[in-house]
Amino acid sequence: MTRLRQWLVHRVAGVIHSDIQRGFIRAEVIKYEDLRDCGSEDAVKRAGKPYLMGRDYTVEGGDIISFRFNVLSSNLSSTSASIFHKIIYRLIISYG
């Protein structure tokens, strides 16, 4: 019997790194089938197929996810405390 888990996208982010979960903004999700059919990530974007998903999105097999998150560094001086690091971390959830 196959054990199936449902993961919310912000939990997946936390498995990668706690900072991604802590500073999670949203996830840009591209379906593998769309990437295969369109041929490139840019073509998928031109076709309007990426989805911007919030914390409650349940990750599915074949999702290609770019995590958008902000993390305020505790090492920053008070003058630069308003500067946030913006990072996109990509994860491909493979079919299993």
Image: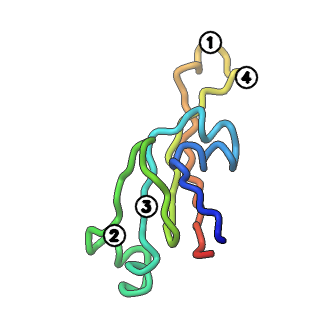
What's the distance in space between the residues labelled 1 and 2, CA to CA? 38 Å
Figure check: 28 above or below 86: below
x 35%, y 75%: residue: 44
x 39%, y 74%: residue: 42
Is residue 81 found left or right of 74 in the rendered image? left
Amino acid at pointer 1: Ser
Is residue 39 found left or right of 14 in the rendered image? left
Mark closest to the chain's N terminus, 1 or 3: 3
Between marks 1 and 3 in the image, the one whose residue lies nearer the viewer: 3
Q: Which residue is mark 2?
A: 45
What's the distance in space between the residues labelled 1 and 3, CA to CA? 35 Å
Figure check: 79 above or below 30: above
Q: How is the image coloured?
A: rainbow
Q: Which residue is mark 4?
A: 75
Labels 2 & 4 near each other (Cβ < 8 A): no
What's the distance in space between the residues labelled 2 and 4, CA to CA? 36 Å
What's the distance in space between the residues labelled 4 and 3, CA to CA? 32 Å
Mark closest to the chain's N terminus, 2 or 4: 2
| Residue 39 in which image quadrant | bottom left
Figure check: 34 above or below 11: below
Secondary structure of the residue carrying tag 2 is helix
Amino acid at pointer 2: Lys
Mark closest to the chain's N terminus, 1 or 2: 2
Labels 1 & 3 near each other (Cβ < 8 A): no
Is residue 43 found left or right of 22 in the rendered image? left
Residue 90 drawn at (x, y percent): 58, 60
Between marks 4 and 3 in the image, the one whose residue lies nearer the viewer: 3
Q: Which residue is mark 3?
A: 29
x 59%, y 15%: residue: 79
Amino acid at pointer 3: Val
Amino acid at pointer 4: Asn
Q: Which residue is mark 1?
A: 78
